[in-house]
Amino acid sequence: MTEQLKQHRDQIDAIDEQVLKLVNERAALARQIGSLKDDGVIYRPEREAQVLRRLQDKNAGPLSNEAVSNIFRAVMSNCRALEKELSIAFLGPLGTYSEEAALKQFGLGCGAVVCGSIDEVFRTVEAGLADYGVVPVENSTEGAIGLTLDLLLASPLKICGEITLPIHHCLLSQQTDITQISHVFSHTQSLAQCHEWLSKTLPKAQREAVTSNARAAQMIHELIAADGTFAAAIASKRAAELFGLNVLAENIEDDPKNTTRFLVLGVHDVAPSGKDKTSLVMVTKNRPGAMVDLLEPLSRHGVSMTKLESRPSKQGLWDYVFFVDIEGHHQDEQVNKALVEIALRASLLKVLGSYPVAVI
């Protein structure tokens, strides 16, 4: 047994040395490619999506496709850092799901720019104080994040990518007895995502919304009342580690498939990757059947619409803007034809960005 163990470990050591050599060869090539670029853009989401899809297609296991993606995202992140360490803005403090999404997409080879609000993420990237921003846009349980949609309408930033992140909530506290919890703090969306669990497990606990899950975890130690009442936060396991809190319960979200979609924001367009999505915002002319007429070119040109979301325009009573996601890149022939026709029919059409469909 001991000899067999040694043989296996020796083989692993030899493979590790090969992997190290090959990774450094890859990094050297990536640096050479960087020197040939003339536009200054280091992050190429379309190229990284192509790499991950190709490797997943070739993956024979036993590693899962998600594990393969995690490994090669880390490799690409560190190769990028040889050219420049990108700075990524997200809603803070550290420990938010926005930070998790940023880490998933960009890896550890980036600098964090922690923002106090979603608005600040937009402003930070617009001002050039961060290379990219990561913001939540919708949740599979609670729907769209209205603030993000409103900011997209007004902002000059482009959508450069999307990230899908499974959300698993935990109940965190400095206490160890869940029956003592009288107040629960978290982001509004997280409180809603755990509504049934809270109603069943902590029916008398008061629920209070704060700016982020991690902010709730951060403030818990300040909210232990002298009269024997105690507070808890709904946040991630990472937040528990960062702020030294006990995990009283795990996976308390009502929907086990609870997932949040995040957008990557930047100042440049993204080239086609072969499997893309385009996000639009449009305003119809005020006449009967205008919305049907506006969307008709998509059907005629064979372009699939995957999302339609309305928001008040804030320009007049009962006026709305419509946020639409479609399959394909705006440079694709059929997509381009449809958009040209929509532009003629709409009172406003803004392409928010074309970007690769999220890779797990």
Image: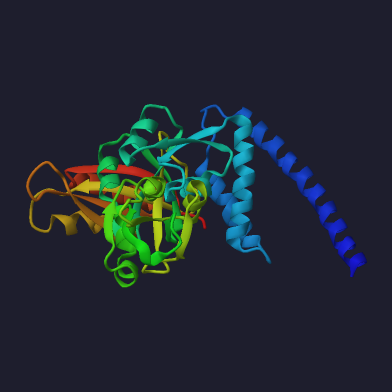
Q: Residue at x 26, y 66 (%)?
A: 204
Residue 156: x percent and y percent?
32, 34
Q: Residue at x 57, y 59 (%)?
A: 66
The answer to whether residue 97 shows anywhere in this view is yes
| Quadrant holding the N terminus | bottom right
Applied colour scheme: rainbow
Q: Which residue is more in the foreground, 345 or 257?
A: 257
Residue 73 located left or right of residue 127: right
**Extreme residue toward the front, this view:** 227
Quarter of the rendering containing residue 316:
top left
For residue 302, say whether it is visible. Answer: no
Q: Nearer the viewer, residue 40 or 61?
A: 61
Q: Residue furthest bottom?
A: 200
Q: Residue furthest right?
A: 3
Residue 195 is situated, as x and y percent measured from the top left of the image, at: 30, 66
The mark total stands at: 0
Q: Give the percent coordinates (x, y) of residue 154.
A: 25, 37
Q: Nearer the viewer, residue 164 or 209?
A: 209
Apparent side of residue 109 relative to residue 247 in the rendered image (left or right): right
Q: Measuring from the top left, give residue 138's x and y in whole percent.
A: 33, 55
- The one nearer the camera, 119 or 84, is 119
Q: Report whether 7 appears left or right of 172.
A: right
